[in-house]
Amino acid sequence: MQIEHSEFQDQLVRGLAHRMNNILTLFHGYVGLLLDNKRLDKTTLEGLGKIQDGAKAASDLMDRANSIVRPPSVVWREVRLGDFVRMLKPSFDTLCGPKTKLKIVCPDDLPTIHADAVRVKTAVFELVRNALEATFAGGGTVRIELSAEPRPPGNHAHQATKWVSLRVIDDGPGVPEAIAERIFQPFFSTKKKLAATGLGLTVAAGFVQQHGGLLKYESTAESTVFQMLLPA
């Protein structure tokens, strides 16, 4: 999947996200002050709470939309992908449903990758978040498996002979065939909750493309696997 960019579009999205976050900061601040008013009745407090939830969802949307564009500066360095996954584990735990189990399998001798650390963390988080949300209601297991892989088949002769694979596997309901071609489209989502932005897979795909890697998936009624392959 190719995600086309232009410098103008990137600047537009970054500027919009910055301005919107400034406006939403006012929402958060004033609503927070009103919620501290003990004299307000229950109905008013509930309404203010919904406004606050909406402002939080909008802030999250702006942050994730900003993640799609190319950053104005990228800091390339050696990254240990396994360390990032372990570091994010507490955040993943907060997203787990009451019956969801999260397992991480990572060898100690995993090769490093050359990447921008911030975008690595964002892409990994989005893939795992999707899997955890797929199993939240009914429970199940989400596995994060990291391994070293040989160079994948295809037109990658100019790239590294060793690659690093991150596979996120869940036993949720899977991706219906009817929507399979749309899952990487920006703002496409089957989730009904307010905070659903439909940007998670778009963010991950944009990162993988920028770093010369591959993003693949397989889905059945019993299991869904998203695999991120990056040159070591």
Image (cartoon, rainbow, N blue to C red):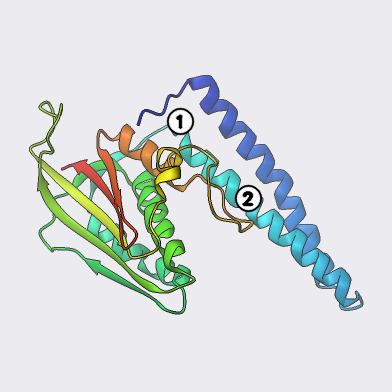
Image vertical order of residue 52 relative to residue 201, above or below: below
For discs 2 and 1, the disc positioned in front in the rendered view: 2
Q: Is residue 27 left or right of residue 222?
A: right
Question: Which three-letter amino acid code belongs to the residue tagged 2?
Answer: Ser
The residue closer to the viewer here, 121 or 5, is: 5
The residue closer to the viewer here, 178 or 37, is: 178
User: Which mark identifies residue 72?
Assistant: 1
Residue bearing the label numbered 2: 59
Image vertical order of residue 58 relative to residue 5, above or below: below
The residue depicted at 38 percent of the width and 53 percent of the height is 127
Q: Earlier in the sequence, mark 2 or mark 1?
A: 2
Find the distance from the CA under tag 2 to the CA under tag 1: 20 Å
Q: Total number of numbered labels?
A: 2
The residue depicted at 44 percent of the width and 40 percent of the height is 202
Where residue 160 sits, quadrant-wise, is top left
The residue closer to the viewer here, 92 or 215, is: 215
Q: Quadrant of the N terminus?
A: top left
Question: Which three-letter amino acid code belongs to the residue tagged 1?
Answer: Pro
Percent of width and height locating residue 219 = 31, 52
Percent of width and height locating residue 25 = 71, 51
Percent of width and height locating residue 7 = 49, 21
* SS under mark 1: loop
The residue depicted at 45 percent of the width and 30 percent of the height is 72
Percent of width and height locating residue 210 = 33, 32
